[in-house]
Each structure stands twice: as structure tokens, then as C-alpha cells.
Image (cartoon, rainbow, N blue to C red):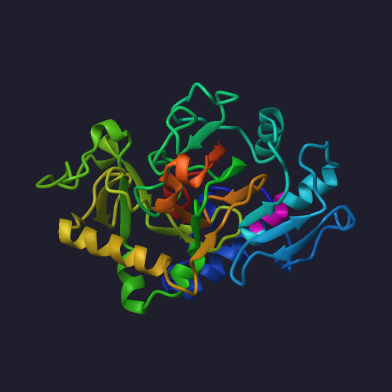
């Protein structure tokens, strides 16, 4: 698969190319030139080695693909693996149906196709492996209320949020769906006024939920200095490290979000200003509204045995309220999740454009 976008200063954005169209064209052309990856891969085209092994069908018109002909419990040919790795970044979400209760060993093997596992979550005693996050609607079976604080990508508290997550459903509850939305389309849909503001914003993430507060920002009244010493800083808009498409880095849950600053300078570790609480609330409201638009939002109704590989940097998600309904009335929900570390931070990638 294509390696991540190298973080080389020689690839800095030429002066005067600040518009969204020019920026995205530059990133994609520059990435292909440096990586030698040639023309963009056409949707639904498969590598020669994988063509006979599996087929793809669209999950929905915007993103996602259902993979047919693959049993993840079997050992797969490396050509097949490489084809699937490319397809993840082309379609941003791959769904494998009827995989059964895939064992921990196999789920970890699939996860490691993409790199090193990074497990920062609570280790539930029912989890089959320390690197598998077990999620449920029954506290005796797994961690509850996961993904319910707001739309997000996973790992914003890290300098480099997770690049991939896998989701394996051992058991599903009635209406226990997950909402997904593609981030490049959100950026494309911004008005020029919105884009002018959002490209200057940096999302300030709480490093540890223990240090955050859901009712007000700890930063209220503070000068926008020494920011990275207290929080994790991400550009709200930046190029995806593999595709080059403009994407977003954020968490709408206030227990994860300290707020936003304008024009962060990493060398000085300071910004021009904090957004006010009202301004922050408005940005998060606008994000939620765009992600939940009928054109973009996709409601995934899971089936038992579903296995998904998600490009975490390209797709935002949000667990529906029904995921927490009682197992006595709606059935038991058991999700096994893994997360894969990313080599490059959004801030480091964004600084290529300075």
C-alpha cells in the first residue's frame, strides 16, 4: 500500500496557494510525485493479484465498500492483503459480513496489516486480549457509553490520532447502530467564509479526561501561550497523510474538547487568540449539523459477525443512543475494537504548508 506522506520541508506549499482548490490539488499532486504512486486508483478496481479472491460493492453512494469472498479467519495471500490495504484508503471503510466471532488472534493480525497497535483504553476483564477494547451495553460484559459523547475521530488526545480502527461485532443489539460521515466531503461543502475561518482554527484536545471538565473550559481567561504543554493541538483542517484529501481532526464531546485557537504557532507554542465559549459552541454545532446532513451521514445497522476496517482519519463516527439500551429488552451488544498508531501528526503534516 502507499506509504504515509513524508514530512519533508522541501515539500512546503508554494506562496499564494492558500485557496482550498489549490491546496488540495497541490497536496495530491505532490504526494503522488514523491511517492511515485502514479494516477489515482479508480473506485471498484482491484489489484491483479486480488481480483479473483474477492469483490467489492458500494456500501453507500459516498463512501464504504462491502467485501465479498473473504473469510478473515483464514490465512490470506499477501496480494489479497495489499489489495485490501489499498481499498481501505480508497473507500475509507470496508465491511466484511458473516465473519462470526472472529478470535482475538485474527483480529490483531488484521489490525497489524496497517502498523503497530496502540491501546490506550480501559482493559475490561472480559476482553480476550489487552489490545482489544471490549464494548457493550452491559457493564459486566464490556465498557459502556463508548462513543456517545459526540461526533469524533478516535485518539484526538494523542499528537497522532489513530490511523485505523477495526470493529468486530460478536453480538448486536436492536437498533444499536453507528453513524458515519466522510470528512473530505464536509470540507468541500464549506462556504468560502466558513473555509476562511476553519483553515485558521486549531482544535485543542484534552490530553486526559481526568484533567478536563464537561461544564466549562479550563482555558477561560488564559492567554493563548504554552498551549501544547497543557493540551494536544491539531489543525482543524489538514491533508490526509495517504490520500492527500483535506480532512478534519476534532472531537465534539466537551469532555474531550478544550476548545479552539486561531493561527497556532508551534515554534512559539502560542496562538493569536482562543475562541470564546459561544464561538466554540457554534463551531461544534456547525460540525454536527454538517456531519448529520442527509447527503453525508450513513447509519450503519450492524449484524452479528460484521467486521469493519475504518480509516479513522477520513471518517467521523458517533454511536447512536440505542447502543446503550438494556440488553434485557434489546439484546446484548458486544464489540471488539482495535486501534492502530499513526506515524505522523496532523500538526506536522499541516506545517508542510507553512
Looking at the image, residue 45 sits to the left or right of residue 317; the answer is right
Q: Position of residue 158 (x, y in %)?
A: 41, 38
Q: Residue at x 43, y 68 (%)?
A: 15
The one nearer the camera, 24 or 154, is 154
Q: Position of residue 45 (x, y in %)?
A: 79, 65
User: Compared to 15, does 337 lie above or below?
Assistant: above
Looking at the image, residue 128 sits to the left or right of residue 40; the answer is left
The residue stretch that appears in magenta: 85-89
> Quick one: which residue is furthest to the bottom in this view?
192
Q: How many marks?
A: 0
> Quick one: which residue is furthest to the top in this view?
125
Q: Residue at x 54, y 41 (%)?
A: 342
User: Compared to 25, does 32 lie above or below?
Assistant: above
Q: Position of residue 256 (x, y in %)?
A: 31, 43
Q: Quadrant of residue 231?
A: top left
Q: Quadrant of residue 202?
A: bottom left
Q: Residue at x 45, y 39 (%)?
A: 137
Would you say residue 97 is visible in this rendering? yes
Q: Quadrant of residue 33?
A: bottom right
Amino acid at each position: 500500500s502507499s506509504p504515509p506522506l513524508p514530512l519533508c520541508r522541501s515539500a512546503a506549499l508554494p506562496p499564494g496557494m492558500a485557496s482550498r482548490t489549490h491546496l488540495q490539488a497541490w497536496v495530491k499532486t505532490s504526494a503522488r510525485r514523491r511517492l511515485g504512486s502514479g494516477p489515482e486508483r479508480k473506485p471498484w478496481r482491484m489489484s491483479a493479484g486480488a481480483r479473483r479472491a474477492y469483490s467489492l460493492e458500494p456500501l453507500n453512494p459516498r463512501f464504504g465498500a462491502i467485501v465479498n469472498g473473504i473469510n478473515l479467519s483464514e490465512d490470506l495471500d499477501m496480494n489479497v492483503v495489499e489489495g485490501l490495504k489499498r481499498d481501505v484508503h480508497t473507500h475509507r471503510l470496508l465491511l466484511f459480513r458473516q465473519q462470526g466471532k472472529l478470535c482475538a488472534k485474527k483480529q490483531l493480525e488484521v489490525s497489524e496489516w496497517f502498523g503497530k497497535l496502540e491501546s490506550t483504553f480501559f482493559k475490561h476483564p472480559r476482553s480476550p486480549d489487552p489490545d482489544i477494547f471490549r464494548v457493550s451495553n452491559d457493564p459486566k460484559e464490556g465498557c459502556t457509553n463508548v462513543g456517545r459523547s459526540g461526533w469524533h475521530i478516535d485518539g484526538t488526545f494523542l499528537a497522532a490520532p489513530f490511523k485505523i480502527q477495526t470493529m468486530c461485532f460478536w453480538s448486536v443489539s436492536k437498533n444499536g447502530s453507528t453513524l458515519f460521515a466522510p470528512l473530505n466531503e464536509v470540507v468541500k461543502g464549506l462556504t468560502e467564509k466558513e473555509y476562511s475561518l476553519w483553515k485558521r482554527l486549531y482544535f485543542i484536545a484534552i490530553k486526559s479526561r481526568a484533567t478536563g471538565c464537561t461544564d466549562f473550559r479550563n482555558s477561560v481567561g488564559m492567554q493563548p501561550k504554552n498551549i501544547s504543554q497543557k493540551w494536544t493541538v491539531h489543525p482543524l483542517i489538514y491533508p490526509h497523510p495517504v490520500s492527500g484529501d483535506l480532512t478534519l481532526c476534532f472531537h465534539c464531546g466537551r469532555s474531550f474538547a478544550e476548545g479552539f485557537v486561531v493561527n497556532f504557532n508551534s515554534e512559539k507554542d502560542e496562538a493569536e487568540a482562543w475562541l470564546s465559549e459561544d464561538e466554540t459552541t457554534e463551531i461544534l454545532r456547525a460540525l454536527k449539523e454538517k456531519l448529520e446532513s442527509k447527503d453525508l451521514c450513513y447509519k450503519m445497522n450492524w449484524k452479528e459477525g460484521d467486521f469493519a476496517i475504518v480509516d479513522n482519519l477520513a471518517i467521523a463516527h458517533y454511536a447512536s443512543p440505542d447502543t446503550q439500551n438494556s440488553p434485557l429488552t434489546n439484546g446484548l451488544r458486544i464489540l471488539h475494537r482495535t486501534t492502530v498508531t499513526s506515524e505522523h501528526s496532523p500538526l506536522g503534516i499541516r506545517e508542510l504548508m507553512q
